[in-house]
Amino acid sequence: MEVSMSFSNDMDDEYEKLCRRMNPPRVVIDNEACKNATVIRVDSANKLGILLEVVQILTDLNLIVTKAYISSDGGWFMDVFNVTDQDGNKVTDEGVLDYIRKSLGPESCFASSMRSVGVIQSMDHTTLELSGTDRPGLLSEVSAVLAILKCNVVGAQVWTHNTRAASVMHITDEETGLAITDPERLASIRESVCNVLKGSIKSRGSRTVVSHTVTHPERRLHQMMFADRDYDRIKDESVLDDKQRPDVNVVNWYDKDYSVVTIRSKDRPKLLFDTVCTLTDMQYVVYHANIDAEGPEAYQEYYIRHIDGSPVKSDAERQRVIQCLEAAIERRVSEGLKLELCTTDRVGLLSDVTRIFRENSLTVTRAEVTTKAGKAVNTFYVREASGNPVDSKTIESIRQEIGQTILKVKGTPEDFNPGSQESPTRFLFGGLFKSRSFVNFKLISCAFNHYQMETCALKA
């Protein structure tokens, strides 16, 4: 049976390669056809997941999709994207344009059947995947434990939604600056971090994994939160009010055997990626789509079928699609004041910064941690834990402690006016108490003692 399945997969791969040799993908980039956007046309032999691959490449270049027309009914994939840079201008950088041609054209790496959707290659760090119940000061505790265990956080994506928290962290060894490969040490790291995630309270499904895959981190975060069922609404709790919540509808077009998904929401960067990623991971195929995001509101229309060829079959399935798409859009909503930190990287930097936020009663709704050429470039979206507007004196106090030139404010605290209700999802970094003690200080002390015992045993 296994031999038969392997033979079938090999045949499928060879057939796909033959189709692509006979019909190589074609990319046309036109800066004249549209007055205010660069038009990118992609024609290619169709295959499962190709739409997500194309959207991911454009998203990773930080391009904004203002309009898109998608058709992949049958064996051919034809897409038109109107894109701009982040400043709303046409894309004129020849380096970027050449990268698009190579990535989507005949020389594209995604033409290989060996590449999974959303894969990136990196061997210079170890990847930790964390998920669990959100609570005050959680990331401060996690990052403190990693610092004690001589791990440097060189990259991280952190999302919170609907009382759940998820993070993909890239860590290296403090001394070598390389990936950590020793199985015993990895097991110790995983155990220590998992203990912190569990905490001293009963929590649902805490999970720490040392990942050996190379899935795109933002796609992986969607998958982790989907698996954690963050789309299940808590009674009497709403992450966004009704005016902010996306309007998602699913109806069946019986004449054509399609389910039609329509989404109206406030536009933001990476919205198209989040939607297509979720539909793909829920095993739906997009046959046609129309995207219009030229104004402050984005309109998305998808004609889909399940991977088995059927439209949405029941009301329960329809509700699940609606809830999952709402959650996918809400996860990346940037609520709060944007702070950017840029300084020389060092072990424990993330722990120190999150501790300062927590001591000043700030909670972070989303964060991105990166390291480039020895420089830490971090972005945080912060709010008062009480739900009140961020006080300018608080921000100034934090900047004085961290460094005026190191931490910069994008926007002004006076202009930031969060809702009056406090959400249970906004606690990953922050806390309700201005205490220097950790919620689970005993767990961190245990991790430190465990690390000392292991070090002594190795020296012996």
Image (spheres, rainbow, N blue to C red):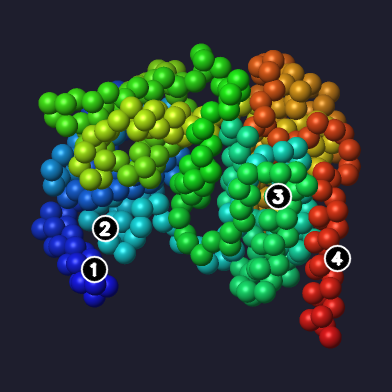
Q: Quadrant of residue 211?
A: bottom right
Q: Nearer the viewer, mark 3 or mark 4?
A: 3
Q: Circle 1: is it few (<14), some (14-19), or many (20+) Cα within 10 Å?
A: few
Cα–Cα gap, marks 3 and 1: 41 Å
Q: Amino acid type of disc 4?
A: Asn
Q: Quadrant of residue 38?
A: top left
Circles 3 and 4 in contact, beta carbons < 8 Å: no
Query: Which residue, given by chain and number where applicable, does mark 1 sit on?
Result: 5
SS category of the residue bearing label 2: helix
Cα–Cα gap, marks 2 and 4: 50 Å
Cα–Cα gap, marks 3 and 4: 19 Å
Residue 51 placement (x, y as % from top left) = 29, 43
Figure check: 211 above or below 302: below
Q: Which mark is residue 198?
A: 3
Q: Residue at (35%, 33%) from the top-left corner?
A: 317
Q: Nearer the viewer, mark 2 or mark 4?
A: 4
